[in-house]
Image: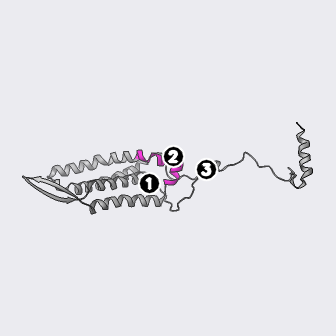
Amino acid sequence: MGDPLNADRRRTEQLPSAAWNQDDVSRPQGPAVTLGDIPAVRYGATGLAKPSQLALAFALLVPSWIVFTMAATSREYDGVGSFIGWILGGIIAPPFAILIAVVLGLPLRLVPWINRWWAGNGRIYLLTAAAGLALIVAGYVKPVQESVTAGGTTSTAEIPDGGLLFAGWFVIAVLLVNASLPLRWVLGEHRR
């Protein structure tokens, strides 16, 4: 079509203020940096929870499971058999809850943008703990009627709602397994 050098010369002759002198501007070194090239800060672990964290969760979940089971089934106590059942349940149920919490927590640990939001977020941890405790308190505040037949006599009693107790217990289990330190309290920091 035309000579590109002549086109540049014609453009600078028409608009002298638009002329660009390459010698006046230093050329950037290396490739251009974009927002996607800047590493975002990731808190917490990006893999599975530490064994020490899982052991601590187990140590806290076992006695609480036993207490909640005793509260939710207190009318069905028949002696040593119930006590052994509560203890065995306390040893068997928490590992399954921990395993489920680890599986549910994988996106919290492996997906970078979810990890940046979750890991160390003190406000979210506090809200999650409050939700779990609210479910536990609701289980005690809203008892359920239970009918028990013993010796041909049927009686009813109010016992804590086991469903709410164990739902709150599981929410706390998820938090114990997937929480990480250090805590941060500012929402939205290091987010993209």
Instruction: Find disc 3 in the rendering and name its residue.
Output: 39
Q: Mark 1 or mark 3, which has the lower sequence index?
A: 3
Residue 43: x, y in percent?
A: 52, 53
In the image, taking residue 48 as reference, residue 15 lies left or right, namely: right
Please provide the residue range marked out in magenta: 102-119
Residue 165: x, y in percent?
A: 29, 56
Type of amino acid at the residue the image marks with label 2: Val
Type of amino acid at the residue the image marks with label 1: Ala
Q: Is residue 123 magenta?
A: no
How many C-alpha atoms fall within 10 Å of the one at disc 2: few (<14), some, or many (≥20)? Answer: few
Instruction: Find disc 2 in the rendering and name its residue.
Output: 111
Instruction: Find disc 1 in the rendering and name its residue.
Output: 179
Residue nearer the viewer, 44 or 165: 165
Q: CA distance from mark 1 to mark 3?
A: 22 Å
As helix, strand or loop, the secondary structure at mark 1 comes to loop
Residue depth check, mark 2 versus mark 1: number of the one nearer the observer: 2
